[in-house]
Image: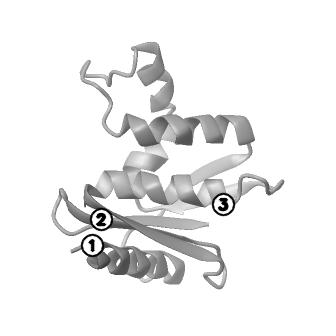
Amino acid sequence: MYTDGACSGNPGPGGWAWAVAPKGEPNAVGSESPSTNQRMELAAVLNALLAYSEIDEPILIRSDSTYVVHCFRDKWWMGWQRRGWKNSQRQPVANRDLWEPLIDLVNKRGDISFEWVKAHNGEPMNELVDQLAVAASRRDS
């Protein structure tokens, strides 16, 4: 499953998208304005996992967002919770309203892994979700 978020300006009109490999279907998009690129990256993953919350098979999320991938791969979220939702600089964690349900969903469902992919590298599925997210962001601009 591939996910992406886009924002025209940061903040500005934002869009998110997810799609399932290898053919890009099913897929979904959404938008929010104003928003940020990071919020849209999170919204893409959250909405993808909500759509597949009842599917009993492993899920691999491929994202070009180091923000999302590192949070789960490096377990940043555990430190945030330990520190009362403060980051390593003791500042409130941005986008907590999206992080909390996403972390809960990942922990409850289990068998979800995250892999970083380079953006704009010609990988067809990553390009597809990028195009879908950009188009969604333009709906609100």
Please tell me in which quadrant of the rendered image residue 132 appears.
Answer: bottom left
Question: Which residue carries the number 2 mark?
Answer: 14
The percent position of residue 44, horizontal first and vertical second, equals: 48, 60
Please tell me in which quadrant of the rendered image residue 76 appears.
Answer: top left
What is the three-letter code of the residue carrying label 2?
Gly
Residue 6: numbered disc: none
What is the three-letter code of the residue carrying label 3?
Ala
Please tell me in which quadrant of the rendered image residue 55 appears.
Answer: bottom right
- Label 2: how many residues lie within 10 Å, few (<14), some (14-19) or many (20+)? many
Kind of element beneath mark 3: helix
Q: Residue at x 54, y 62 (%)?
A: 62
Closer to us: 2 or 115 = 2
Distance, label 2 to label 3, CA atoms, is 20 Å
Q: Are marks 1 and 2 in contact (CB under 8 Å)?
A: yes
Question: Which residue carries the number 1 mark?
Answer: 140
- What sort of colour scheme is used for the picture? one colour
Q: Is residue 28 shown above or below 64?
A: below
Question: Which residue carries the number 3 mark?
Answer: 51
